[in-house]
């Protein structure tokens, strides 16, 4: 179904088309597709386009609704099919800025003019490069589909779904924040929760819980760092004025 969404006469894939394709598959499938779309690189504010429907669907999951409902204006939101196919089929790799830094960075160690030049180790340079036959989103999902199965029913009951819905609301809000690299962890956590709901797999739910904890820890670290910087700058300005 995910691959079929990449084909069509319209060059844009609308949310309405996704809902129509997955409407009978449940809320978990829709949350999964939207979370995968949100993992694409978007300009500032672009994540909010996907965070909003994820929040609404997560609330429907928390309130145990069986039918999917989204406002008409939200159903018109779209993404390029080319970008969508690229998301599914492009091998995973480090971000472009990290690849360029690792591959071109040169360290000089020594005294005076006799400084030796060093680069990152070959295994590090290979790690950040994009491998043509590397793991892709669609391959990862196929593997996850083969590995997931109904287990740990205690983590898939009505109470668990309510808690997962609340967690996905918070994760979607975190994903929309303008935090550097702060969208990947919440997005992956939402993916695991969605797989847990779809496949009734408690292990996937536990991975979503772990992703939620990591996301919260990273956000707290960023908040503490920014607060410390602001406090330091305010103290420096106060010292100049005083």
Image (tube, helix red, strand yellow):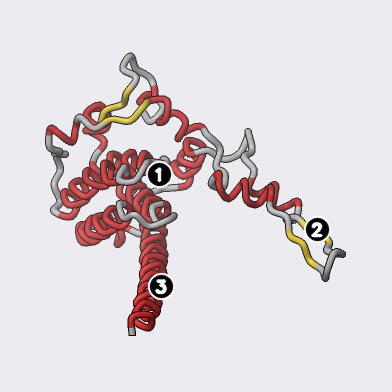
Question: Circle 3 sits in a helix, a strand or a loop, which is it?
Answer: helix
* Most foreground residue, 128 or 213: 128
Q: Quarter of the image for the C terminus: give it.
A: bottom left
Disc 3 target residue? 229
Question: Circle 2 sits in a helix, a strand or a loop, which is it?
Answer: strand
Label whose residue precedes the other's in the sequence (1 or 3): 1
Residue at point 58% right, 50% down? 98
Disc 2 target residue? 117
Question: Circle 1 sits in a helix, a strand or a loop, which is it?
Answer: loop
Give the spatial CA distance, label 2 vs label 1.
37 Å
Q: Is residue 157 left or right of residue 32?
A: left
Label at residue 152: none
Q: Nearer the viewer, mark 1 or mark 3?
A: 3
Occupied quadrant, residue 108: bottom right
Residue at point 42% right, 59% down? 207
Disc 1 target residue? 39
Picture coordinates of residue 227, whole percent (x, y) = 35, 73
Picture coordinates of residue 127, whole percent (x, y) = 66, 49
Circle 3: is it few (<14), some (14-19), or many (20+) Cα within 10 Å?
few
Q: Quarter of the image for the N terminus: give it.
A: top left
Label whose residue precedes the other's in the sequence (2 or 1): 1
Give the spatial CA distance, label 1 vs label 3.
29 Å
Q: Is residue 176 above or below residue 70?
A: below
Q: Is residue 69 above or below residue 151?
A: above
Is residue 107 visible to the viewer in this orientation of the structure? Answer: yes
Q: Is residue 168 left or right of residue 137?
A: left
Residue at point 20% right, 29% down? 76
* Most foreground residue, 89 or 231: 231
* Most foreground residue, 26 or 236: 236
């Amino acid at each position: 179904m995910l691959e079929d969404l990449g084909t069509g006469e319209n060059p844009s894939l609308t949310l309405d088309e996704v809902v129509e394709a997955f409407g009978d598959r449940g809320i978990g499938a829709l949350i999964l597709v939207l979370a995968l779309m949100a993992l694409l690189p978007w300009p500032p504010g672009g994540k909010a386009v996907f965070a909003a429907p994820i929040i609404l669907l997560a609330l429907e999951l928390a309130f145990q609704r069986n039918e999917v409902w989204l406002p008409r204006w939200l159903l018109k939101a779209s993404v390029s099919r080319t970008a969508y196919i690229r998301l599914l089929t492009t091998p995973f790799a480090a971000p472009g800025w990290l690849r360029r830094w690792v591959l071109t960075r040169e360290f000089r160690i020594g005294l005076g003019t006799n400084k030796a030049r060093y680069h990152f180790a070959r295994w590090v340079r290979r790690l950040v490069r994009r491998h043509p036959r590397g793991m892709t989103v669609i391959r990862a999902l196929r593997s996850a589909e083969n590995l997931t199965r109904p287990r740990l029913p205690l983590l898939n009951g009505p109470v668990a779904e309510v808690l997962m819905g609340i967690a996905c609301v918070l994760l979607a809000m975190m994903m929309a924040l303008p935090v550097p690299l702060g969208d990947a962890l919440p997005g992956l956590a939402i993916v695991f929760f969605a797989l847990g709901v779809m496949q009734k797999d408690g292990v996937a739910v536990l991975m979503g819980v772990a992703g939620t904890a990591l996301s919260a820890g990273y956000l707290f670290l960023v908040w503490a760092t920014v607060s410390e910087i602001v406090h330091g700058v305010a103290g420096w300005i106060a010292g100049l004025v005083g």
